[in-house]
Amino acid sequence: KFRLAYPLLLCAHRMFTSQTEGELRVTQVLKEKFPRATAIKVTDISGGCGAMYEIKIESEEFKEKKTVQQHQMVNQALKEEIKGMHGLRIFTSVPKC
Amino acid sequence: MSASLGRAAAALLRWGRGASGGVLPGAGVRAASSGAGGGGQAEQLDAMVKKDKVVVFLKGTPEQPQCGFSNAVVQILRLHGVRDYAAYNVLDDPELRQGIKDYSNWPTIPQVFLNGEFVGGCDILLQMHQNGDLVEELKKLGIRSALLDEKTDQDSK
């Protein structure tokens, strides 16, 4: 029964810890490559293993671009980091005026 | 119970490490053909994505997806009643798996192509499903989404 509770404990633990090294690194790269971004949030969704990230980024640099193009911009920016990941989820948005 | 969770977790980790799926293709699934390599493969992929209106590259098959994101694509297409689409299992062919990533300049699987054009991965398809764009795009291809018929039933009640 403990084995079932363990993932819940881990989840609770992750809620109260600061960012992982991986999250910080990915956030830093995004800040550099998207200087006009108004919001960047990177979350390790692989339980801290650095295997999968969820990336939320809001920037006027995405204005008038199709979603797939916006995602391509993020892919390009994180080209090196992605090599070490199993997967990523990207959510882009344009700031509301 | 925990043993099957462990196995499921191991399977999830494995899909990122190039484990071969070994899944038999089901009805409506085209078998992935290995490319000649180099320039020849790009042309081959080009032909593959243009041959059918809806083309998806998955980990696993529509009958047995081997990844949660690939499964999401399969389920969304099922919701819209899209039954006749080409699905290529990248786990069957490492050259295809890398080749399609190079071809569309997109680092992950699944990949969805509509009318020969790269649309995106599972997140984008989900977004299109939620905001109604997918119904529109299918209509452009002459495919009537099953969800349109569902809606009319609800309205008439």
Image: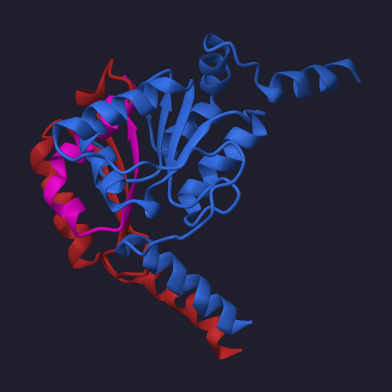
Chain colours: A red, B blue
> Along the line of sight, which residue is nearer the eye, B149 or B90?
B90
Q: Quadrant of the N terminus of chain A?
A: bottom right
Q: Quadrant of residue B40?
A: top left
In this rendering, the answer to whether B152 lies above or below B67 is: above
In the picture provided, is B35 more to the left or to the right than B129?
Answer: left
Image location of residue B129, percent across then percent down: 55, 29
Q: Which residues are magenta?
A: A68-97
Which residue does the image show at 49% across and 27% down from the upper left?
B128
Which residue does the image show at 55% across and 76% down from the upper left?
B5
Q: Quadrant of residue B99?
A: top left
Q: Which residue in the rendered view is the most extreme toward the bottom?
A: A2
In the rendered image, residue A92 lying in the magenta stretch gets the answer: yes
Q: Is residue A94 visible?
A: no
In the rendered image, residue A77 lying in the magenta stretch gets the answer: yes
Q: How many marks?
A: 0
In the picture provided, is A47 more to the left or to the right than B95?
Answer: right
Image location of residue B51, percent across then percent down: 43, 21
Q: Which residue in the rendered view is the most extreme toward the front?
A: B36
Q: Is residue B58 visible?
A: yes
Which residue does the image show at 18% across and 40% down from the upper left?
B37
> Along the line of sight, which residue is nearer the eye, B116 or A70?
B116
> Along the line of sight, which residue is nearer the eye, A9 or A53?
A53
Which residue does the image show at 80% across and 16% down from the upper left?
B152
> Along the line of sight, which residue is nearer the eye, B48 or A24?
B48
In the picture provided, is B114 more to the left or to the right than B95?
Answer: right
In the picture provided, is B154 more to the left or to the right than A73?
Answer: right
In this rendering, the answer to whether B63 lies above or below B82 is: below
Q: Quadrant of the C terminus of chain A?
A: top left
In this rendering, the answer to whether B50 lies above or below A32 is: above
Image location of residue B84, percent across then percent down: 60, 28
Q: Quadrant of residue B43?
A: top left
Image location of residue A53, percent across then percent down: 31, 55
